[in-house]
Amino acid sequence: MPWKASAPPAPYETMPIPDHMRQSLALSVISRRTSKDIKVFRPPRQKNGSCLIGVPKYYNILFYCVMLSKTQERPAVATILAIYRERSDDDLLRVREPRSHVAEKWTELEWQALWYSGAFGTTFRSTDGALVEIIQFGFWNREPGPDFVHVAIRIDGDRTCEGDVEWDMHAADWERHGHSQNSAFDKVVLHVFLHSGGASHFARTTENREVIQIHLQKDVDLVDAHPLAAHPGRCCAPLRELPSSTIDSLIEAAAQVRMQKKAEHFKRAAIVHGIDEALYQALASALGYKLNKLAFLLLAERAKLRVLREYGAAAESVLFGLAGFLEDPVLNRTPLSKQAYWRGLWEHWWRLRGHFGHHILQRNMWKLAMTRPSNHPHRRLGALAELVRRWKEIRLLQPRLEDVAVWFRTLSHEFWDFHFSLVSAATERPVRLLGETRINEILANVIYPMLRSSHQGDWEAYKKIRAELGNRRLAIVCRRLFGEMDRAREHIRFLYQQQGLLQIFEDFCMADATNCAGCRFPEIIAKLPR
């Protein structure tokens, strides 16, 4: 149907909606809450009963979130997807710890490599005399946290425990490193140490649960080991027999499962908060990267998009103030206070602090160490402030991933284009506010799930997003599934492939506590066409 003639054309015009689209335009909400609590979108009707709605002259990215249609899947992927969905489990939490002294850590790494290789054996006596068998050595955690995660042990032949293992040089390191006061170590089931120091030491969690301890006393040769992040799994051999195209179809099926979970998560958030707030919170979490995702989400929940847009030019001050960065006494004692940008933030914040002061995030929420300069929370928060300032432009973006990517590349900030943090020196040349890797992550984890939640995502366009960088967890997955990185390399070039591999790892490797013996993934591989 042609658009109404008008001069100049209005951004929104009224047009009849076919009967088969009426249900698609009304959000169906299944909830325990009463109808008063939920606002369901219902298109207005004409006197003759036909449905009318304001339709954008040019469809935009948020409009598509209420326009539903079905997506098409390739037959091979659809078949494998049905097989894959026979088994799906929830993701498990991972824990972290601060880095310890570098000199000691390297010495410890060599011993940990021997432990993980099985050089010490698999059967031990604990310090209190219990028989401890290692069923599964788990995965090596190269990031802050217990040294080995997702471990399975058997105690006295009849009790099986799943959790993490902390490996220290000295028995006293458990207390010395503060593990007993760190909730990140509450899942540790085994504390392994090399030297006792002649005294008895107890290992307890923050919940006052005693952790089983093993004092390694066997004599082994300290060889020049190259520690691997994980042991090859039982699925390596059957995967080797599959053609590359079948493996890719399997990975794509797993990627679709993962994407559907993200889409459902976004849809739930949109029902509760509205589409704009849900998108804003998702973007904030994505800017938080890995270490500060929770802090950014909490900040977005406390500094809502609606409130920030009402404050206009003061929105950036509200974000930095609620984040607690303007309250940092160290920053306030530096020459930073003489900067025009810093003074500008405080110019608004001191007037608003009384209203927002009780919502300021605690300093320990932020992980400032171990982040790349471009990922520093200060700079990421500046990027979030710029997104808020240009929110009207976001709402008018067309629902094509390429167009969204182009727009994100245009993001710029007078201060943050030349600074990595509030205290860093200015760079000689401007640095893009968001790099290509971060933009791709936002497309894959925020924009596409939003479109997918309304069945409007272009899967083929999503598949074209290249993977700029890998991560440690992906290296573990590749080692577990393929045995060596060379075999995995052709299956991690695109972002959807990495997402699919991570989903397989979570659904099977992380759900298995039998060291592959009881894993069903090899059965799925056996059903795939050769």
Image (tube, rainbow, N blue to C red):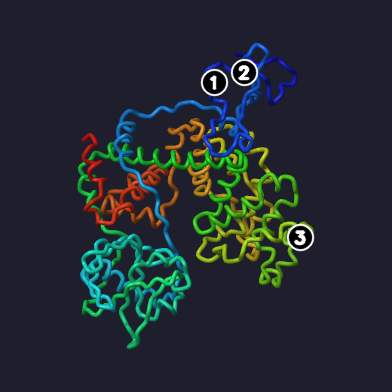
* Along the line of sight, the residue nearer the viewer: 5 or 509: 509
Q: x and y percent of residue 115 in the render?
A: 27, 70
* Residue that appears at 66% across and 38% down: 393
Return the mark for residue 21: 1
Could you tell me which secondary element the residue under label 3 belongs to?
A: helix
Between marks 3 and 2, how big is the CA–CA gap? 48 Å
Q: Label 2: how many residues lie within 10 Å, few (<14), some (14-19) or many (20+)? A: some
Name the amino acid type tagged 1.
Met
Could you tell me which secondary element the residue under label 2 belongs to?
A: strand
434 in relation to 253, above or below: below
User: Do the numbered discs 1 and 2 sit on residues whose CB atoms are within 8 Å?
Assistant: yes
Label 3 vs 1, first from the N-terminus = 1
Quarter of the image for residue 331 reads bottom right
Quarter of the image for residue 108 reads bottom left
Q: x and y percent of residue 206 in the render?
A: 46, 70
Q: Label 3: how many residues lie within 10 Å, few (<14), some (14-19) or many (20+)? A: few
User: Do the numbered discs 3 and 1 sit on residues whose CB atoms are within 8 Å?
Assistant: no
Between marks 1 and 2, how big is the CA–CA gap? 9 Å
Residue tagged by mark 2?
Answer: 51
Between marks 3 and 1, how big is the CA–CA gap? 49 Å
Name the amino acid type tagged 3.
Gly
Label 1 vs 2, first from the N-terminus = 1
Q: Quadrant of the C terminus?
A: top left
* Along the line of sight, the residue nearer the viewer: 463 or 301: 301
Q: Label 1: how many residues lie within 10 Å, few (<14), some (14-19) or many (20+)? A: few
Could you tell me which secondary element the residue under label 1 belongs to?
A: helix
* Along the line of sight, the residue nearer the viewer: 85 or 272: 272
* Residue that appears at 29% across and 53% down: 512
468 in relation to 172, above or below: above
Q: In the figure, is residue 430 to the left or right of 77?
A: right
Return the mark for residue 354: 3
